[in-house]
Amino acid sequence: MPEQDTAPPQLLCGSSELQERGKAVTFDVIQWREPVRAFALRFDGQAVAYLNRCAHVPTEMDWQEGEFLDADKRFIMCSIHGAVYDPLSGQCVMGPCNRGRLTKIEVTERDGEVYWHPTRDTKPAFQD
């Protein structure tokens, strides 16, 4: 059997920390050997997570720590150039992000906790 290339699911936060259309929980990952911030939020009852990198220009998008949604709490909006993304798919819906999309991080919930799932390209920021 080949050696597993990814780490097991990583505990991110308690489910109750992700309030519907509220402040996101931010966390650090390593993508292609570089440190990158990521965020998770709850939208329409679902926990979703993305790298904190705009598809237009790879800069962090939050207005303030953990604040990613627009004033109406309908879309993820980049604070730098106003690129607008669908919170459930990460697809750009308006602005300079053209047809881009945010880099999704798989998350699951069980037993009142939210976990993110590392991939070959996106790993935990700290590994033994």
Image (tube, rainbow, N blue to C red):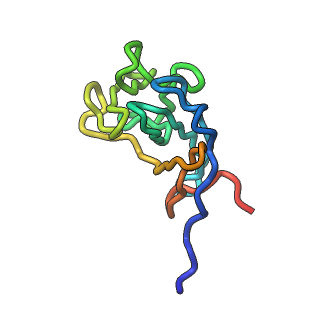
Residue 58 x, y percent position in the rendering: 45, 37
Q: Residue furthest top?
A: 71
Judged left or right of residue 20, residue 15 is right
Q: Residue furthest bottom?
A: 1
Q: Is residue 72 above or below residue 115?
A: above
Q: Residue 33's quadrant in the figure?
A: bottom right
Residue 61 x, y percent position in the rendering: 48, 28
At 47% from the left edge and 25% from the top edge, which residue is drawn?
A: 68
Depth check: give the residue in front, 54 or 19: 19
Q: Residue furthest right?
A: 128
Q: How many marks?
A: 0
Depth check: give the residue in front, 51 or 47: 47
Q: Is residue 15 above or below residue 10?
A: above
Q: Residue 93's quadrant in the figure?
A: top left
Depth check: give the residue in front, 88 or 104: 88
Residue 50 x, y percent position in the rendering: 46, 41
At 53% from the left edge and 27% from the top edge, which residue is drawn?
A: 19
Judged left or right of residue 104, residue 4 is right
At 59% from the left edge and 52% from the top edge, which residue is drawn?
A: 30
Judged left or right of residue 47, residue 87 is left
Q: Is residue 118 above or below residue 16?
A: below
Residue 121 x, y percent position in the rendering: 50, 59
At 53% from the left edge and 86% from the top edge, which residue is drawn?
A: 1
Q: Quadrant of the C terminus?
A: bottom right
